[in-house]
Amino acid sequence: MIESIVIFFRRKRKLSGYATTINCFDGAVQAPARKYMKRRYNVKYVDPIVEPGIVKILIGESDDPDAGVILRQIRKKLKMSIIDHKSRKISIAAHHNCLGNPASKEVQENQLRKAKKVIEKMIAEYELDIEIVLLWIDEHHMPKEVPELLGNLSFKETLYKTAK
């Protein structure tokens, strides 16, 4: 009996397909985002789309003179991931101590929400069911999902107040 339990927990999950991460260039935060997507969605591969301060670029707040070119490259890479690799799960990540976007956690979480709207517009033409998750990668390199806001409340807070 114990042997079969050990075998059950040792058995590897069957991974298949692709997901996409839209993430900062910082190498310290790429692996946590990739691992999170692999585990959360049971995918084998994760296509990385990386730039320093990528969230600022997506929402048009970057002072980089090449931001327009970078945005077109992001769109091109995203299309390849969605069309060619059939990725249906996308994460957009921001992180603690970002050199390309040295804003507070709260500011970056709001930027993530705006960036999600930009990505939704970019991919709307494909008319596919694609899930987008927002990630905050903390100072310990641990990714955590950023909740959607409904008014001034998060989705979880709204559910709690509705249930009362």
Image: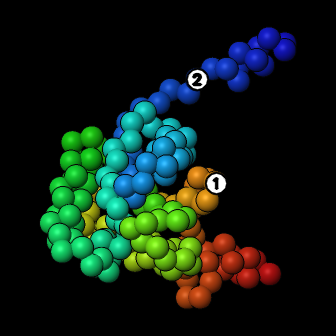
Please name the amino acid that badge 1 sits on.
His
Depicted 89 relative to depicted 58: above or below: above
In the displayed orientation, state which residue is furthest to the bottom: 151
Depicted 62 relative to depicted 41: above or below: below
Q: Is residue 109 left or right of residue 51?
A: right
User: Residue at left 30%, top 71%?
Assistant: 57
Tell me if mark 1 has few (under 14), some (14-19) or many (20+) residues whose alpha carbon lies within 10 angstroms of its own: few
In the displayed orientation, state which residue is furthest to the right: 1
Find numbered disc 1 in the image and state the secondary structure of the residue it sits on: loop
Residue 137 x %, y %: 55, 59
Tally of numbered discs: 2
Residue 39 x %, y %: 55, 41
Identify the residue position indicated by label 1 in the image.
140
Q: Quadrant of the N terminus?
A: top right
Please name the amino acid that badge 2 sits on.
Lys
Residue 9 x %, y %: 70, 24
Cα distance in 3D space between marks 2 and 1: 27 Å
Q: Is residue 123 left or right of residue 46?
A: left
User: Residue at left 51%, top 74%?
Assistant: 109
User: Residue at left 59%, top 88%?
Assistant: 152
User: Residue at left 21%, top 42%?
Assistant: 84
Identify the residue position indicated by label 2 in the image.
12
Tell me the tag on residue 9: none
Q: Quadrant of the C terminus?
A: bottom right
Q: Please tell me which residue lies in front, 143 or 89.
A: 143
Find numbered disc 2 in the image and state the secondary structure of the residue it sits on: loop
> Would you identify the image quadrant in which residue 11 lies?
top right
Residue 61 x %, y %: 32, 80
Q: Earlier in the sequence, mark 2 or mark 1?
A: 2
**Mark 2 or 1, which is nearer the eye?**
1
- Can residue 50 be seen here? yes
Tell me if mark 2 has few (under 14), some (14-19) or many (20+) residues whose alpha carbon lies within 10 angstroms of its own: few
